[in-house]
Amino acid sequence: LKCLCSHGHVEGTAVLRRQMPRRWAKGSAVEPDAGAAVLAGGGAEHGKGSEGTGGPAPAAETAATNSESAACTCTGGEPASTADSWNRVRDKERVEWELGLSELGAPDVEFFDASAPEMRVARGYQRVVYGDHGPYIEFRTDQIEWSSLPTQILKEAHSYYDEFHSEGGFVQLYHQQRSVEHKANPPPGGVRHNREGGYADYKVGMCYVSPSMLSVAKPPAAGGACREAAGGRRWRR
């Protein structure tokens, strides 16, 4: 693993798909054309479930506890980067270029539905997880605006996550129920590395959303060169 305190840009895997203009926040300094490519994530692992609307949000205590046990740390006390292979490095560069997000989280970044930029989805994030099935922004449950995700799909006990969707289904949040540390490779569409510790560092109790579904209110301080190259892209004004 490469450590964030000594390495600036290391990144995760993802599947590329053609992006439609609605994935970019209206009013951004630079809006893409319909052919722009953007990172597309996939769920941690899929299971069957029943769909409902509304309902209480998951408890924040479990998520907060798990956030403190993220990955290994270096001598400087900073978490090790999850971007440790070519595909993850590629994804990290793209997330930093498009959203200006550093891998380590920040408490004051506001996230909005990229298809409805007036709809706030979260405030603050824990980190960006770079895995072999794409990058995901990690949130505690108390950082989520649950009223913006009225549709819930609660699955069986053995499933890996429950789902919470925005109205219309553009934003899909995964509330992790099981670890994938025993899964050496991701579902179809990912990159196979046969990892002993699992294909992604998802934490039970935490929430995950693909960066392709979100825009941010303002650029946080993420790698200077990448931030300058972004030129305001996908930053909600």
Image (cartoon, grey):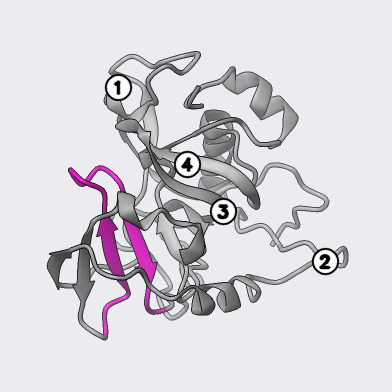
Which residue is disc 2 drawn over? 77
Other residues around mark 4 within 10 Å, as few (<14) / some (14–19) / many (≥20): many
Give x and y (percent) for residue 141.
46, 65
Q: Amino acid at mark 2?
A: Gly
Other residues around mark 2 within 10 Å, as few (<14) / some (14–19) / many (≥20): few
Task: Kindly state the secondary structure of the residue where label 2 is placed.
Answer: loop
- The alpha-carbon separation of the residues under discs 2 and 1 comes to 40 Å
Whether residue 82 appears in this view of the structure is yes
Whether residue 191 appears in this view of the structure is no
Task: Kindly state the secondary structure of the residue where label 4 is placed.
Answer: strand
Other residues around mark 3 within 10 Å, as few (<14) / some (14–19) / many (≥20): many
Which residue is disc 1 drawn over? 21
- Dot 2 or dot 1, earlier in sequence: 1
Left of 149 or right of it: where is 86? right
Which residue is disc 3 drawn over? 125
Which residue is disc 4 drawn over? 111
